[in-house]
Image (cartoon, grey):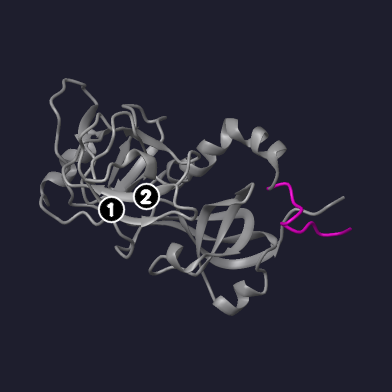
Amino acid sequence: MKKRSWERGIFTGPVLLALLLPYLSSALSAGTEKDAASGAKLLLRIRPSSDAPILCALPAGTSPVLLPGDHFLWAEVLLPETVSVWVPQSGIRKDGVLASGTPVRTGPGAFYLLAGRAKGGEKVRLFEKSPGGFWRKVRPLKPFLSCWCLRSELAANTANKGKNVSGEPGGGRLFEERAVVEGILFLLPEKERKKGVSCFALVLFAGKSHYVRTYLQGEESALARWKGRCVKITGKRFWNEGLFRPVLAVEKIEPGWEDV
């Protein structure tokens, strides 16, 4: 049996991309949905339903701006301006204002969860660009994206109202569970690396683009031995505040898919 290299693997090519399109979006965005089954204090969703994808998880003590509404179980709130999102570079005008209809996503690519669309005129602060420069990480100067959370969770946070909402990693683990995850072990470019996690990550490839499935924590030298290979990693998976993908604390690495 011969191991399949990722250069020739099933993660590349237009055929795979066409096959993945119907469900790759949920695979990349629902990591938060699946991983946030328990432990996070305030989960913001794109619709008022427990089945709706999770947009982000806010730490305990945060109180986003509440919008008027009479829904019994769910509250509509504004996504805090301290939470980073991504927009196409083409949707940003020279004055840092978003064009009408610009898609706002949780990551740099159409496979990431759609958080909403700009109505036009929203001013944003600009951060780094994605590889290739097609997407830009931004933060709105004023909240404009609405999302939903349970009223019971929102009420539980009121007592500690005023705590800073961090949109960057480093705030600690919000929840944790054991998991087994497969993917290509990839060395992230310098500008894509995050504080508190390894420079390696598990990714999916679509053509020449890569999409982070989960960040990793582990011994760098041990991870480097598996660089570029499809692997299956067992460990503790958790959500780190400010990261839009989960983190996997590595316990065991073994080969992933193989050619028959």
In the image, the segment drawn in magenta is 1-11
**Residue 157 lies within the magenta run:** no
Q: Measured from the top left, where is residue 132 in percent x and y?
A: 49, 53
Q: Which residue is mark 2?
A: 136
Q: Is residue 167 visible?
A: yes
Mark 1 touches mark 2? (CB < 8 Å):
yes
Q: Residues within 10 Å of mark 1 (few under 14, many from 20)?
A: some
Quadrant of the image containing the N terminus: bottom right
216 relative to 40 in the view: left or right: right
**The residue positioned farthest toward the front in the image shown:** 94
Q: Which residue is mark 1?
A: 126
Which residue shows up at 47% across the image and 69% down it? 190
Element under label 2? strand
- Whole-angstrom CA distance, mark 1 to mark 2, is 7 Å
Q: Amino acid at mark 2?
A: Arg
146 relative to 184 in the view: left or right: left
Q: Is residue 242 visible?
A: no
